[in-house]
Image (spheres, rainbow, N blue to C red):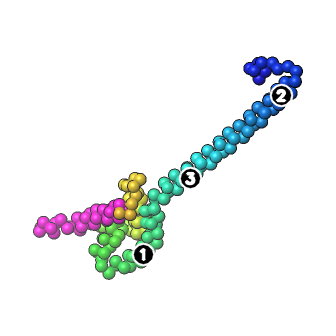
Amino acid sequence: MAMLFGRQSGSDAGAESNYSSTLEVIDALYTLEMKSNIAALGQRRRSARLHRSMAQWSSYWPVALGIAVSFFAPQMRAFVEPYRPWGLWLGFPMAALSIQPGVHLGSWMSSTLPTALLYLQFPLEGLLAKVAQRDKVTVYGVALQVLYFHALCFIDLWLLNGGLHRLMGR
């Protein structure tokens, strides 16, 4: 400091030491303020990261809803059972596809797969709807996507059961 501002002599020597202690205090305050700002910036970044993470996880609500609905799958199957085969085709098309005679599976798989698909159909549809819609997951979009999957499976079941053959009158 003395080189920058020149040498002081005599009674100004006490003022210079007072000036250097003032600079040390200012430097200490600056250091504390910078540490405080860095800590606040880190807290804001953590908060923003947590918010982005929660927003990202909340976009998987169709899968969560599918899991919740799958708990009621046996009751829904009992409800559509009297309207067989159409009720099963409309309500649980993936399970209905797995029991078709044209699908050649082993004995263990043919007994296990329909039950597994009964429970997994709705979470799978939710996951497929989430993947198909990427970031813009809306209730309307998910409903259309699930109806689309059901319609494709229903058309496949209809074709497997000779619907086109009957339609053409042969």
Q: Does dot 1 land on a helix, a strand or a loop?
A: helix
- Magenta part, dominant SS: helix
Q: Are marks 3 and 1 in contact (CB under 8 Å)?
A: no
Residue 131 is marked as none
Q: Looking at the rendered structure, which numbered label has been put on residue 74?
A: 1
Q: Quadrant of the N terminus?
A: top right
Disc marking residue 15: 2
Calculate the distance from the C-alpha at mark 3 to the C-alpha at mark 2: 52 Å
Q: Residues within 10 Å of mark 3 (few under 14, many from 20)?
A: few
**76 drawn magenta:** no
| Amino acid of disc 1 | Pro
Q: CA distance from mark 2 to mark 1?
A: 89 Å
Confirm or deny contact between disc 3 and disc 2 (CB under 8 A): no
Q: Position of residue 51 (x, y in %)?
A: 54, 53
User: How would you rate the neighbour count of disc 1 (Cα within 10 Å): few for under 14, some for 14-19, many for 20 or more?
Assistant: few
Distance of label 3 from label 1 (alpha carbons) = 38 Å
Left or right side of 49 for 135: left
Q: How many marks?
A: 3
Earlier-in-chain disc, 2 versus 1: 2
3 or 1: tag closer to the N-terminus: 3
Residue 79, position in %: x, y? 36, 79
- The amino acid at mark 3 is Leu
In magenta, the rendered stretch is: 141-170
In magenta segment, residue 154:
yes
Disc 2 marks a residue whose amino acid type is Ala
Question: Which residue sits at x=65%, y=43%?
Answer: 37
Task: Write down the residue under mark 3.
Answer: 50
**Which quarter of the image is occupied by the C terminus?**
bottom left
Residue at figure coordinates x 58%, y 51% from the top left:
47
Is disc 3 placed on a helix, strand or loop? helix
